[in-house]
Image (spheres, rainbow, N blue to C red):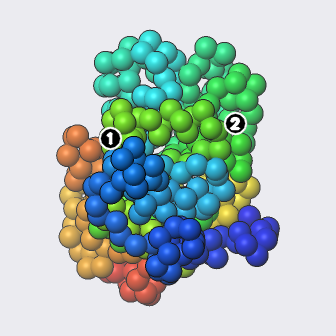
Amino acid sequence: MTRHDNCTYENRFKTLAVGAAENATHPDKGGTSDVIPPLHLSTTFEWASADGGNEYAYSREGNPTRAALEEQLARLEGGKHGLAFASGMAAISTTMLSLVPPGGHLVSSDSIYSGTETLLTELVAGYLGVDVEFVDAREPENVAAAVDSETDLIWAETPTNPLIRLCDIRSIADVANDHGVPFGVDSTFASPYFQAPLELGADIAVHSTTKYLNGHSDSTGGAVVTDDDEIFEKLAFSQRTGLGNMLSPFDCYLVARGIKTLPARMEHHEENAMAVARLLEAHDRVARVHYPGLESHPQHDLAVEQMSGYSGMLSFEFDGSLTEIEAFIEGLRIFTPGASLGGVESLVEVPSLMIPDEISHGSATADVPENLVRMSVGIEDVDDLCEDLQSALP
Ligand code: PLP
């Protein structure tokens, strides 16, 4: 049984994903009975009286299209409060900067998206003087050994980019609870459809909505969901007033639109990724496949326990030279070489060859092999994807 089966009619995930229109159709909110949340581009709203008095006054502080998306994001993650940011990095940096004071202490998993790693080393540690401790969070004991009651935030990404490693959210949440430390999880690779960090005990779930939530590679954004009122107040202040890094109404509209098909897309991504992972695993020029759905993944049991599906992201180690990897990439017709992930189209990336330093998916804290190829498996016909790989592999 997955968590999606274990829900009531009103909150089964697929129904939640489609039924985003409460804000728009509620008789007290607009009264136009739109079935989808309308796109409010106005930056300012006419005052109901000379001293204000209306729900929305200025779009940075509050916008009805953003409010509808934030409500939708909170519902999907099973949380109380949602916040929509201008990018995944805006969501992550705002969380860190709002919860960790200069000179504070932050414990992070060592295998994380390189942008997050750069944020932690350059800005959080380098500029704010925070003591940032990277640990191999595949073992929760390593997190426990680093955390104490002075720790301001525990940070983990699972599954990780690009090595597809997992962290045990429930065990790390127990460590966080023992010390009264907030615990944030970047759940971008799983999407809310396949993983529920808050249900597993985390305090904060974070996503780059640029990826699966929007799902169409045409909007950059980020999301934070939390049940904790105090965390929400701090982050909302930063988003709306202090930093002003909220998501634009048009992007909110796109993400809300993408979310309606999230379950259908995720099931298709996973089905295709499983077929691609099995094909790669059986190929004699592939040394190792990193996909949590494979029994050979060292944390497959944890994946079964904490995820309700394995998503569409995988990476593999090519048994050959960089020149051969280049020829493989050039031979692909359906997989497009490019950064990013989580869109309907299949993408391929070789961190050591393709990514400029500033967005490098190599990592200083976790060894990313030179021969690693990362794939975001899309929702095309699975036979076409498999044939594409078979004809491009040597
Ligand atoms: N988190 C993960 C796991 C990512 O892979 C990325 C980007 O690739 C981000 C966060 C950052 O998101 P964005 O590019 O929307 O700022």
Residue at 43%, 61% (x, y): give it: 64
Where is residue 326? Give x, y as percent.
Answer: 22, 62
Where is residue 202? Give x, y as percent.
Answer: 65, 41
Q: Specify whether 74 is left or right of 90.
A: right
Crowding near pointer 1: few (<14 within 10 Å), some, many (20+)?
some
Name the foreground residue: 259 vs 31: 31
Q: Specify whether 208 is left or right of 148.
A: left
User: Which residue is labeled 1 in the image?
Assistant: 244
Alpha carbon distance from label 2 to label 1: 30 Å
User: Nearer the N terminus, badge 2 or badge 1?
Assistant: 2
State the image quarter where residue 317 is shown. Answer: bottom left
Asked which secondary structure carries label 2, the reply is helix
Please identify the residue farthest to the front as the structure is shown.
Answer: 50
**The disc label shown at residue 284, or none:** none
Task: Give amino acid for label 1.
Answer: Gly
User: Which residue is labeled 2 in the image?
Assistant: 173
